Image (spheres, helix red, strand yellow):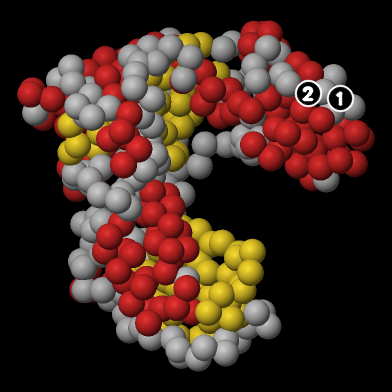
Amino acid sequence: MSEPAPRKIVHVDMDAFYASVEQRDDPGLRGRPVVVAWKGRRSVVCAASYEARTFGIRSAMPALRAERLCPDAVFVPPDFVRYRAVSKATREIFARHTALIEPLSLDEAYLDVTVNHSGLPSATAVATAIRDAIRDELQLTASAGIAPNKFIAKIASDWRKPDGQFVVRPREVDAFLAPLPVAKIPGVGKVMNGKLGALGVATVGDLRALALPTLEARFGRYGRRLHELARGIDDHPVVPDRPVMSVSAEDTFRDDLPLAETEAAIRSLAEKTWAASLKTPRVPRTVVLKLKTADFRILTRSHTPSQPPASCAELTDIALGLRDKLPADPAIRYRLVGVGLSNFGDPEASASALSQPDLFAGA
């Protein structure tokens, strides 16, 4: 039996999306360092224009630090209704070429164009046509990676940013991956990078030299995944319309805390959860607070307001309000707190139709 033909995957990533939309819609912002964020002590950067990035400003950075790095930066409050509308328009462009579209966030998506609707002769031609349409119709730019699988396509889309594309053909996979830092592999963060460094692994080529039994003995099931990705093996298909059900962040304290001392952690976790929620076009409507007591009893409280939270500040206020409804027993200590968003729905859906009463559960 012959081997199946390799997939043709395109990863499309809009360039500095939120900031670029702001610069497109306000000519006075073009060429200037634009930071999409609410100004304030607890705010974080949602996006930065390429002009702002030259000062070292990056997404998820505290807004105060961004101000210090570039005092002349223009801060623009985010407008997610507008960003979602532009994101929807980009997906309409994608749909001219394929029905296999897997959004990762408002500004990026995987497309399987192994067979395309438009009759173009190659995945490279499809990516070019998509980027041209985004430029002509939306006055924005996008970058693209074209490869035999999702893993490599995502790396490739970053290769010629902004406003570029890069192709990795099946025969080029080994040579493309070998010199890359091992941190390019999904799941290899700071801690895993240190563990691999202790094994003498700095590049994907170094990782490829380790035997599968060695990786499995050291990292379990993830060791097999590392073995496969080092060889460019990724069989995960493009899955269209995978709905986000919930996002959350939690933290375990070094020392157990009374309820009154959890505010700082709740504020920090709310920022992380809000940032994660912005990666999907769907709208979260329910705020969830989770606490675990020193004796491992889990308490959760949730609230669905009449209108979805519109900002990190609103999410934080609701989460703190939920905390204030818990029993204020000074004898109870807490070892963990978490903040979550759930009940995601389409932006067009009626908030009132999805509203539900507060829930409280203890176990």
**For the point 53% across and 69% down, which residue is it?**
337
Q: Do the residues labelled 2 and 1 touch (CB within 8 Å)?
A: yes
**For the point 68% across and 25% down, which residue is it?**
182
Viewer-closest of 109 and 95 = 109
Give left or right: position of 297 versus 63.
right
- Quarter where residue 88 is shown: top left
**Res 170 seen here:** yes
Q: What element carries label 2?
A: loop
- Residue 233 circle label: none
Vertical comparison of 324 with 190: above or below: below
**For the point 22% across and 18% down, which residue is it?**
135
- Quarter where residue 27 is shown: top left
Residue 223 percent across, percent down from the top left: 80, 38
Q: Which of marks 2 and 1 is in front?
A: 2
Kindly identify which residue carries mark 1: 210
Viewer-closest of 22 and 255 = 255
Kindly identify which residue carries mark 2: 201
